[in-house]
Amino acid sequence: MRIPIWPMLVLALAVAMGCGGSSTPEPADAPAVAADPSGLSPDELENGIGPAKEAVVLGAIDPALAETGKAIFETKCLSCHKMGERFIGPDLTGILARRTPRYVMNMILNPEEMVKRHPEAKRMLAEYLAPMAQQNLTQADARAVLEYIRTPVPPASGAAK
């Protein structure tokens, strides 16, 4: 005996509509659910995932902080990143035109989780095929590297004047 499918569909629809839950609104303090399929909040999508939670205020470049950042960059980052050119990792010149300072710091401080969960970090991994290594920097170190990255790239030696 063959059962027609349309009565089963009507029954399934009725059951689904009956399971809609209560009509009581959610409390105002209920956490907002991210609409993005990654499950990240809008703040995490813009600023990355990691310990840098506060806005990073950028003013005039601090030469002493940039010099500290340069030393850290040359020790920890230079094997994969070049300023002014693509290398194993992306060129970081002008990164702050594409990413927020907090995003950059969170990528420096929390690269494993960023690559696992953040859609832009995943895209970059797919493009460069090399995950960013955890360098175990402090927030102060990451801020110094950020300050160095902000400094203008000097022209290449031998360039026309």
Image (spheres, grey):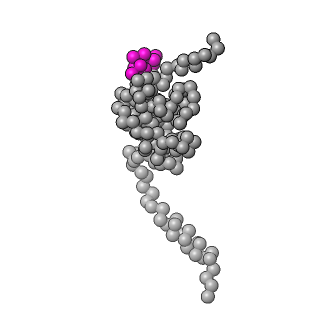
Type of secondary structure dominating the magenta stretch: helix
Q: Quadrant of the N terminus?
A: bottom right
Residue 101, percent from left and from top: 46, 29
Residue at (54% x, 71% y) in the render: 12
Left or right: 69 as drawn, with respect to 14: left
Q: Nearer the viewer, residue 100 or 125?
A: 125
Query: Magenta segment, which residues?
Result: 59-68
Residue 88: image location, x then y, percent:
53, 36
Q: Residue at x 54, y 18 (%)?
A: 154
Residue drawn at (39%, 21%) of the image: 68
Residue at the outermost front position: 158
Q: Is residue 102 above or below residue 70?
A: below
Q: Nearer the viewer, residue 160 or 144?
A: 160
For residue 75, above or below residue 24: above
Q: Nearer the viewer, residue 140 or 78?
A: 78
Q: Identify which residue is drawn at 62% across, 77% down.
A: 5
